[in-house]
Image (spheres, grey):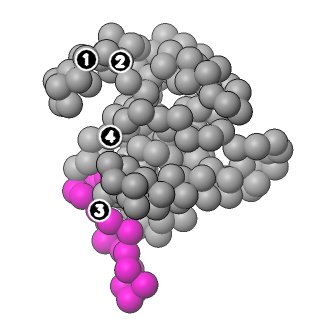
Amino acid sequence: MSIDVNNESGHQVDEQALLDIARYALARMRIHPLSELSVICVDPETIEQLHLQWMDLPGPTDVMSFPMDELRPPSRDEEEPPQGLLGDIVLCPQVATKQGADAPTKHSMDEELQLLTVHGVLHLLGYDHEEPAERAEMFGLQSAIVDGWRAEQGLTGPSPAPTTTS
């Protein structure tokens, strides 16, 4: 799995954890091991500009996903998933800091960024949360992936609750 993590936000970010949780999420979703993903952390001004340009919504947001090859998790019948370029996940640590602090289960910026990375991966794989059934599926899967990764890392305590607005 080729995953690039770039921090252009000006904030200290646990880039290794973002790389690890992205790799875990993609493996759990059975995405081809030669697929490519980019994760970029940016400042509020940059993500606000992207938010306005691509979604016509003002203000900074927490995470945005830009799919490339529109890969999907393979069905149970497929022997091998296709490989390709998944796309880009853009994160904003400053928004993540506020969301983590405001969440019912208060958590750190890094924990929020890990959750948002999984959220972004799922968006790249075609999951959405516009409708209640879609929301239940996506957020259930997101929680299962984050919980699985945290358990594998030996992290204790409750996983961050979904806080994303994207």
Residue 38 placement (x, y as % from top left): 38, 40
- Crowding at mark 4 (Cα within 10 Å: few <14, some 14-19, many 20+): many
For the point 67% across and 31% down, the residue is 104
Principal SS element in the magenta part?
loop
The mark found on residue 71 in the picture is 3
**Upstream in sequence: badge 4 or badge 3:** 4
Judge whether residue 27 can be spotted in this image. Answer: no
Give how far apart the Cα atoms at labels 3 and 2 are: 27 Å
**Upstream in sequence: badge 3 or badge 2:** 2
Bounds of the magenta segment: 69-86
- Crowding at mark 3 (Cα within 10 Å: few <14, some 14-19, many 20+): many
- Crowding at mark 1 (Cα within 10 Å: few <14, some 14-19, many 20+): few
Residue to which mark 4 is pinned = 65
Residue to which mark 1 is pinned = 58
Residue to which mark 2 is pinned = 60
**Upstream in sequence: badge 1 or badge 4:** 1
